[in-house]
Amino acid sequence: MKIGVVGGGQLGRMLGLAGLPLGFQFRFLEPAADCPAARLGEIIRAPYDDLDGLERFAQDLSFATYEFENVPAETAQWLSERLMLAPTARALAIAQDRIAEKTTFRDLAIPVQNFIGISSANEIDAAVRKVPLPAVLKTRRLGYDGKGQRVLRTNGDDAAATVRTAWDELGRVPCILESFVDFSAEVSMIAVRARAPGHGSVIAFYPLTQNEHRHGILWKSQAPAPCDRDGQLADAAQKYVRALLESLDYVGVIAVEFFVTPSGLVANEMAPRVHNSGHWTIDGAVTSQFENHLRAVGSMPLGSTECKGSSVMINLVGRTPINSRIMEIPNAKLHLYGKGARAGRKLGHVTLTGPTAKSLEAATAELEKIVVWDV
Ligand code: AMP
């Protein structure tokens, strides 16, 4: 079975690493030379919207998927007219537009903060009346790792003027103004849905993961989430994500990020793909998110999402410590993506697994000393 993956970054690489033992072959569409997925399969080196490249990429594939959500809409459409693309072009389109994403959540009774779109300067006065500061102004499209957004606080200034300045700084592109959420933690639910021939569909959930960001980039994930002492947050997240997956007739892995607030979960965004906050599943779950994504997209039975105890994952960004220092830590598993060092770039991650969260505390503290980011 030959699988096409749009994008040859680290997520493509980890899909390849998970799929090769199952007998899958891979072809990646990737414009950059020497990408992380390069050694895992055939690379079609072409821009994502290049028709000739797409023709060569799509030739005799069993199915196609993607590893990042900024795949051009025309490319997703072109592929889905010729072969099975999962997750669908519709799920991708929703995730590419923060307004469509929040509207989808709201329509499904998934709690979201107040939000409003701003696409011209004369909408700003009305927008701040609906969504007063403190708020966050984000570009509707193409934001990632905290880029393309500004946190706006009140300090007695004219709120509309504050938003106008931020909107100018973001390039006067269509934006979303959303209320600032005073959260106590951030969590994500990684789930997978597959169509089961003759039996409708199946959905499997990984344990809720708690995430900590630094400089807008994921620093650490812990699963199961320590903030969810009685499992109520995981129950709520499962309910919301199930509704989303069913309404989209979704196939594959999805990640939905939530803020934890005194009144419960507030959905922030979704990624229609394997996700950084699920990397711990490679070492900490019976079946990783990567393998389950391939199983779902390939219409195969899903693997168990049971976790082996507790896991902690820490990202390596900008530079990597000396490998042997990580290998000295008991139960530490090092994953490098084969990328050159550059400030702000995700170069790898380290996962710790153990029977309980407590059993990981010393190793986590050790790892947190060794890992120094360059951002
Ligand atoms: P995002 O690109 O939407 O994932 O935002 C990146 C990070 O910014 C999130 O993980 C939060 O830490 C923070 N953030 C985003 N939106 C809000 C918000 N409305 N209120 C408070 N913090 C936010």
Image (spheres, rainbow, N blue to C red):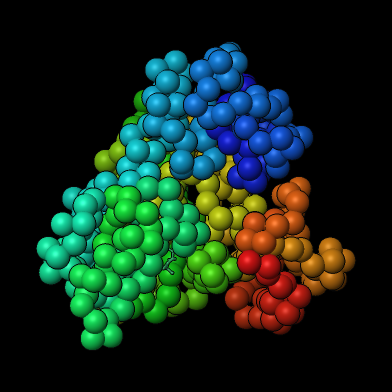
Q: Nearer the viewer, residue 222 or 73?
A: 73
**Toward which corner of the image does residue 334 lie, by quadrant?**
bottom right
Is residue 116 something that shows in the picture?
A: yes
Assign the C terminus to one quadrant of the image. Answer: bottom right
User: Percent x, y for residue 70?
Assistant: 46, 41
Kindly identify the residue that appears in the image at 53 percent across and 29 percent down.
48
Q: Nearer the viewer, residue 155 or 268?
A: 155
Q: Nearer the viewer, residue 142 or 164?
A: 164
Classify residue 121 as left or right of residue 337: left
Kindly identify the residue that appears in the image at 21 percent across and 52 percent down.
120
Kindly identify the residue that appears in the image at 46 percent across and 42 percent down.
69
Is residue 15 something that shows in the picture?
A: no
User: Percent x, y for residue 64?
Assistant: 52, 27
User: Percent x, y for residue 1?
Assistant: 62, 21
User: In the picture shown, does residue 229 fall above or below 352?
Assistant: below
Q: Residue furthest bottom?
A: 156
Classify residue 307 as left or right of residue 337: left
Find ligand 1 in the image and state its quadrant.
bottom left
Q: Residue furthest right?
A: 324
Report the label total.
Answer: 0
**Toward which corner of the image does residue 306 lie, by quadrant?**
bottom right
Classify residue 59 as left or right of residue 137: right
User: Percent x, y for residue 254?
Assistant: 44, 47
User: In the picture shown, does residue 345 fall above or below 198?
Assistant: below
Kindly identify the residue that appears in the image at 60 percent across and 49 percent down.
288
